[in-house]
Each structure stands twice: as C-alpha cells, then as structure tokens.
Amino acid sequence: MSITDVGYVAVLLSLVVAFYSGVAAIVSARRGLEELEASARNGVFAIAGLLSVAGFLLFYAFFSHDFGVRYVYVNATRDMPWYLKLSAFWGGQEGSLLFWAWGLSIFTAVVIWQNLRRNREFMPYVIAVLMAIQSFFLVVLGFVSNPFERLPFSPLDGQGLNPLLRDAGMLGHPPFLLAGYMSWSIPFAFAIAALLTGKPGAEWIRAVRHYTLVAWAVLWIGLLFGAWWAYHVLGWGGYWGWDPVENVALMPWLMGTAFLHSIIVQERRGMLKVWNFVLIILTFALSIFGTFVVRSGVLSSVHAFAKSAIGPLFFLFLAVILVFSLALLFTRLSSLRSEQTFDALVSRESSFLLNNLLLVGITFAVFWGSILPLVSEAVRGVKLTVGPPFFIQVAGPLFLALMLLLGICPLLAWRAVTWATLWRNFRWLLLGTLVVAGVLPFVGVRNPWAIVAYSASAFALASIILEYYRGVRARRRFSGEGYPKALSTLVSRNKRRYGGYIIHLGVVIMAVGIIGSLMFQKVREATLSAGESMSIGGYTITYNGNAEVFMPGHQMIQAKLDVLQGEKKVGEMGPGKSIYRNYENQPVSRIAIRSGLGEDLYIVLAGYEGNSLATLTVFVNPLVAWVWIGGVVLLLGTLVAGWPELQARAVPVRRPVRRVVASEA
Amino acid sequence: MVESEIASVEPVAKQGRRTSRKLIVVGLLLVVAIGYLFAVSIPKFMSYYMTLDELKAKGNAAYNEKLRVGARVTIGSIEKDVKAGTLRFIISQGEDSLPVVYTGRMGQVPDIFGDDIEVVVEGKYLPSGIFEAYKIEAKCPSKMTAKLETAEGGGQGGK
C-alpha cells in the first residue's frame, strides 16, 4: 500500500461521514436532538480534515514525482517548475473535482463555525443540503473519477501538462473558477433551509448576503483570470470569445448579480421573495452546469475536453437539484406573499426589477445561444451554431440598457419619484452626457454605436460621481468634516451602498475598455523576410530574423522585432512558438504584448520558415488595460461592500426605507 | 418589515395593482425585445454544423450556405506556403474527402493544426467542389485527449 492510497481511503471515509452528517442533521432538527446536531457538525469538521489530507497527498504525489499515480503521470513531468506542479493539481478532471469537494468541505466548516450561535433554525438543514452536495462529489471521486488511481507500474517520468496549460495563469484561473462555482452551494443551502423550515422571510437573505458576495467575487476573479489567460496565451487578439466554456462560467455570475440586487429589494420592501428563491436556485444549477457541461461532451467547444463518463451522472444531479428545489418552492408559495406592492412605475425598486430582467435576459440569451446546437438538432435534426457576432448583437444592446439603468437607478427614490426632483438631478447628467456625445466625434470616435455606448458610460459615471458628491456634501453639512474625512466616514458608514457604487465604477471602467477593444481593434498580417518592415496604427515593425532559444523541457523559435512608434524606437519584441517535449506536434504561440493605458501592441508569430522568414499577425488593441483595471476596481468595491460591519449587532434591523435616499433625491 | 408611513391601505393597494400591471407590461416588452433580438440574430449569424458525409449527402443543396464541417485532416495533404501566405489541405472522413482553401489570417490557424487532426472548418462549399474556409477550429488529437480531458477553462484554444 502506498501513501497515496491513504488519500483514497480519506475520500471514501468522507463519503461515509457526509452521509451520516446529512441524515443526523435532519433527524436532530425533526426530533430536537441538540447532541445529534453537534455530532453532525463534528462530521462536517471531520470531512474538512479528511479531504485536506487527501488534497495534500495529491500535492505530495506531484512534488514527490510519484508517477505510479495515473493522474500524476498524465499531468506532470519531472522537470516542470514548481508552479506548474501546483497547478497540475487542477489540470485534470479528477483533481478538479477533488478541489471542488475539498473547497466545499472547508467552506462548509467555516460556515458552520460562524453560525454556531446564529441562524440556529436553519443550520441543521444547511448542513443536510451541503452534505448532499458533498456526497455527490465524493461518490464521483470515489467510484468514477478517482485521482488516486494507480498504474500497474511506476513510470520514471510523466507525460506532462498540455503545453497550453503551462502558464502561470493556470495557478489562478481554474481554482478561482472552481471555487466560485462551488461557493454558490452556501447561499443555495440557506435558501433550501429557509424553505424547509417554513421561514422564507428576510432571515435567510440576511444570513447569505456575505456568502453571496464571496461567491460572486471569487467567481469574478476566476472569470478575470480566464480572460487574462486567453488574452496572453491563446493569441487570437482578444480576451473573450463567447465559447461555450466561457459562457457557462459567465452565466452563474450574471444570475448571481441579479440575485445580489434583488435581495436588496426584499430587505427593504419585503418584495420579490419567490423571485429571489428562483434566482439562487438557478444560479446554483448554472454553477453545477458550468462545472460539468464541458466535460460531458454535449457541447462542442474549442476547448476540446474529451467526452467523459461523468456527464450523465452530472445531468442526473442537476435534474435532482432543479426538480427538488423548484417543487419545494412551489409547495411554499402560499407563505411567500409580498408584504408590499409596487407603488409607482418609476421607482428604485422597479429599476431593480428591470435590472433583474435584463440580467436574466442576458443569461438566457447566452444560455440558448450556447445550447442552440443541441436544441436545433432535437427539434429540426440540424445542428445550428452561432458565434461571437451573435452574442455581441444580442447581449450588446441589453448591456447598454443595463449601463443606462446603472446611471438612472441611484437617481430614483424608493417607492415613488416626484418628477421635479428627478429632473433636478437628471438634467445635469443629461447635459454632461450630451457634451460627451458631442465631443466624441472630434476625438476620433465616429462609429455611432461607439458614441451611444460611450455616452451611456459617461452618463453612468457622472451619476456615480454625483451620488458620491451628494453624500459627501450632506455629510459635511451635518458634521462639518473636511472632504477626505467626510468621504471616508460616508463610505465606512454605508459600506454596502458606496461599495456598490465602486463596483459600478469598475463596471463602467471595464465598459470603456470593452467598447474600445471591440470596436476599434486594428489587425494586419504580413509575411516578412529579414530586414523588411510593416506598419500598423502608427507603429513600424522591423523583422530581424528568427532566433532559437533552448529552455528546460522546451525550445522556442523567436522572431526578433524592432518596434518604432512614429520615428521613435519604443523597444524590441519577440513573439515566438514553443515546442515542448512529448508535444512536438503542438507548438504553442508565445505572444509578445506591449501594454499601455491607451492601447496594446499585440504580436503573434503566425508562421516561420528557416531563420529569415516569418508571418506576423499584429493587433493594436485600444484600451484593453482598462478591462483589467475595471475588473480590479470591481473587486475592491466588493471588498468594501462586504467588509464586516463591526457595529452590526447594535443595529438589529435595517430600516425598511432609508430617509436619506428620499430626502437627498 | 412593517411600512409605518402608509396611512391608508385601500387606495395604495389599488394603485399598487395598477403599477404591477404596468410593470408586467414593461417586463413583457423586454421579453419581446429579447425575443426579437434573438429572432433576427439567429438567421443572420447561424451556420449549419455537419460532418463531411452529411455534407456529401446533401450535395448541391449545400452550396453557398454558411457551413461548419467537421472531419479529419488527410495526412500529407497540407500545402502551406509561408511566403505567399496560402494554406490548402484536404479533409476526409471514411470514403469522403474535401479540398479546403483557407482564406483567413494565418495567425488565426490553431497552433495544433496539422496532419490527422480533427478540425471544424467554417465557410462555404463552392460549386467547384472546393470548400472555402475563413476559420479553422482544431480538436486535440486523440493521443492527447487523456491529458486534455481536463483542462478546466483551458484546453484547446487558438481561435
């Protein structure tokens, strides 16, 4: 018996404990047996321990070069650097699933720990739901997709990670994406617990808000890393290709965004209760869908995952989740009456509702676009597919509407708006927006869609600034503080609101980058002999022949380029192709990127012959840097919005409608 | 949460119903708008996916439609001229084969493209019997699927 077998035993033991804890938690709640619930809790902690053992043993297998483990043999080689060995853990299906289960076990333990004294009624059911999810993954790990499976012999070296994955970006992208999917389990579990206990009021919403923000932020980091990786590694000049793999990761995030907004309405006005349950159920279902769909082989993707036996199992799991949760919700409908109705068509809450419809609309558009081949084959017997232009045309106008709403929403009061106050705020924004729209054509933006999109962004930006300004002004009048102090008190006293505006600011900044790189990308391809030049977008690129570079485990052919901007030499660039041992017929492009706040120069070595002929594909991508900057600002905003409220216990219930909003408006 | 500010419940409830109705109309309009976007965009941007034998079975009917065809690159058929920037190859499936001329950018050919690789070519089937492709997608070769069956979010890129 080898040490890694202990990992397998730990997985199997976890399954037994998960089953026990789930059943014990339910029995304890039904019979009121506190000691049994404590035992179920201990089970949860035990699983976190057991799966940590399993996880560390898999890391150990990678770092001790235990190629007798099939998973290690397939994904690692001796000479891979440490960070690739680390990322090889989730380089394959078995390891990814183990990561999911391990992460869930730790999250579950943390949640149980934080709620030892809070949300007492919910907790047994939360445990039961999480253990059911955990059990599913453990069954798959134990019996279908075992990362600790041993080969009949121990090879001296492994095959190694696919060349495309040999990038430091793989350290971040897969774990955050998987953790993002996984962490939606927590709000979902609370939702089901709320339905089961017959207390589907505001308590569960309060209980899950922070967990939801965590899940949302983690999934966001996964998406951002993914876009970053695609841009820096894949070499097609962009960061988002509307490929099914990307789409399935975006969907739970969009749906979760809708949820984050609509729970505010429930907290404030006691409305949209059923809607919130539906949103969180669908968000979780989409997370499970995202975890497995690309592995099931039902959607063909350029991310060519091989078909895998776990597809049908996951479909079954997904069906169980949906049928069970929606049926449960249906039986509880009578207790989910709204406490309020909409007072006016134009109000804060109706703008939230519209925001929700748009986000869900985009999600559905992306969903149907992605599964169109399946649907059309079932209905008409032909496989129809749609590419990026489809998604841009459908989602583009909806995102535009969302951007306008993002600007309008803060101007609206809860319940009802008087047109006079609305106009008072609105006119300045409108004026500002029109000025921007008027100036844009003179700075080179002549595409009408770009003008509309940038004007909408300017409108949203102005509205965020106005909100901050009004908040600071009111604060100063009230306390006489200086501007910096007033700003910091304002934000720290209303983290949710002003953190939310920072998130919005991140969205606007990203939009600026996305619109720029989508609509104003320049691209040229040319085949050059040594000494020849090409020019694009003010750059002159001179080709000086190819060089060969040898590195451990791979070699690289590199085109040597001198880059001039106007007359001034701005640097040397060296796009290349790497060829890895074991993967000789799969060269990987090494893209050369010169990034700036204004634009990126992005060069791919598309082909070469001998050492004095090369085909170069050159992109000039405007404003891409702002996509990353906006993404990080969004994250910082989430951090502010989710920062623990120290005096939270002193303020037991939020006032339904804050006066500030109405009086300021 | 109790709304203490509401003085008289009756008229508010009535007004609420009216507002809800208006909101439903707005929601429906939005659904219609999304449906419309969908309905016009699908025919505009869709392409039919078929395997090579399905294409051959369709014959003349397949000419000049926007198609995506899946097959395997015939070993030894790739004629690539770096200097001229041209790429021609033959894809085949069983008995059927089809010559392909690539018209897109060389930088967009997947790195993995090569002999015996499973590809999906997107473009038009011309009456001359040649397939004019502006896009090539490649699937990883079977000998590597063991490794790629994985690759969360990673996998075969190269659009």
Image (cartoon, coloured by chain):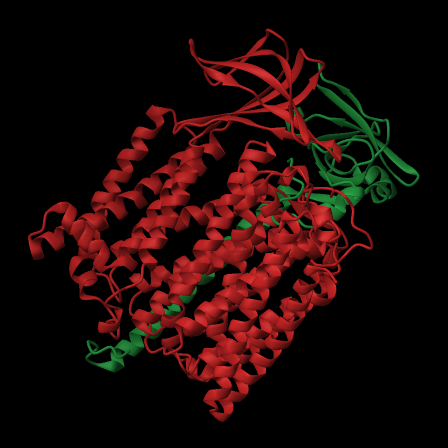
Q: Is residue A465 left or right of residue A170?
A: left
Q: Is residue B54 placed above or below A316 in the rendered structure?
A: above
Q: Is there any visible trace of residue B105 in the rendered image?
A: no
Chain A's shade in the image?
Answer: red
- Dividing the picture into quadrants, the one containing residue B121 is top right
Q: Is residue A414 left or right of residue A45?
A: left
Q: Is there any visible trace of residue A69 in the rendered image?
A: yes
Compare residues B6 and B81 and report the one nearer the observer: B81
Residue, far right:
B95
The C terminus of chain A - image quarter: bottom left
- Dividing the picture into quadrants, the one containing residue A141 is bottom right
Compare residues A180 and B127 and report the one nearer the observer: A180
Compare residues A449 and A133 and report the one nearer the observer: A133
Q: Is residue A520 placed above or below A80 in the rendered structure?
A: above
The percent coordinates of residue A97 (x first, y second) are 63, 59
- Chain letter, colour green: B
Residue, far top:
A531
The percent coordinates of residue A398 (x first, y second) are 46, 49
The N terminus of chain A - image quarter: bottom right
Residue at 19% of width from left, 76% of height from top? B5
Residue at 67% of width from left, 26% of height from top? A555
Q: Is residue B128 left or right of residue B37?
A: right
The percent coordinates of residue B107 (x first, y second) are 64, 26
Q: Is residue A120 left or right of residue B75?
A: left
Residue, far bottom:
A31
The percent coordinates of residue A612 (x first, y second) are 67, 11
Residue at 57% of width from left, 79% of height from top? A22
All told, the count of numbered labels is 0
